[in-house]
Amino acid sequence: MSVGRYVLAVDPGGTTGMVLYDMFVGGVAEIYEIPHADVGFMLERIIEQYHPDVVCESFTITANTVSNSQAPWSLKQLGVAEYLAAKYHCPYAEQMPVTAKKFATNERLKALDLYVRGHGHATDAMRHLVIYLVRHGWWDDRLKEG
């Protein structure tokens, strides 16, 4: 399995973290933490320009979700991301948050120089980037350090 030149990882929410990774240079091209109202615009700008693989943190409504918040941001953003990925013929995937958090720990992100200090949403997007890359054959020996 392989990925395209770019991978866009998204952590949806009231504040959304986005990370665009360039496989060619092996590094982060752009990092964002943006308010819900600007997510659609930014997703389209990035997806149209870079045609990345798009990977998002999945969001499931549970009884706990309903009791905590009625905020629909994450579901709306996932729909927009999936639509734009299809519109621009880009691969689209969703991943469970628990999987990314267990594998792409803060220690592993720091070992890879991918930890985004003070930006929790961008850091969570970075977790999804790392697990997506590993699932598609990418490996860095520094992952062993976390």
Image: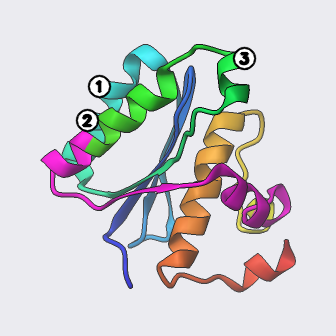
Give the number of the mark in front: 1 or 3: 3
Q: Quadrant of the C terminus?
A: bottom right
Q: Which mark is residue 84?
A: none
Q: Residue furthest front?
A: 63
Q: Real-space Cα distance between discs 1 and 3?
A: 30 Å
Q: Which mark is residue 45?
A: 2
Few, some or many residues within 10 Å of mark 3 (<14, 14–19, 20+): few
Contact between marks 1 and 2 (CB within 8 A): the answer is yes
Residue at disc 2, secondary structure: helix
Contact between marks 1 and 3 (CB within 8 A): the answer is no
Q: Quadrant of the N terminus?
A: bottom left
Residue at disc 1, secondary structure: helix
Instruction: Write the residue at 40% across / 60% down.
Output: 7
Vertical relation: 62 (above or below) 93:
above
Vertical relation: 34 (above or below) 18:
above
For badge 2, the amino acid type reads: Arg
Instruction: Write the residue at 72% across / 86% down.
Output: 141
As drawn, is 111 to the left or to the right of 5? right
As drawn, is 5 to the left or to the right of 71? left
What residue is disc 1 on?
Answer: 41
97 part of magenta stretch = yes
For marks 1 and 3, the one nearer the N-term is 1
Is 39 in front, or is 92? 92
Q: Which mark is residue 67?
A: 3
Q: Point out the stretch of residues depicted in magenta.
A: 83-108
For badge 3, the amino acid type reads: Ser
Measuring from the top left, give residue 77's x and y in whole percent. Answer: 40, 31
For marks 3 and 2, the one nearer the N-term is 2
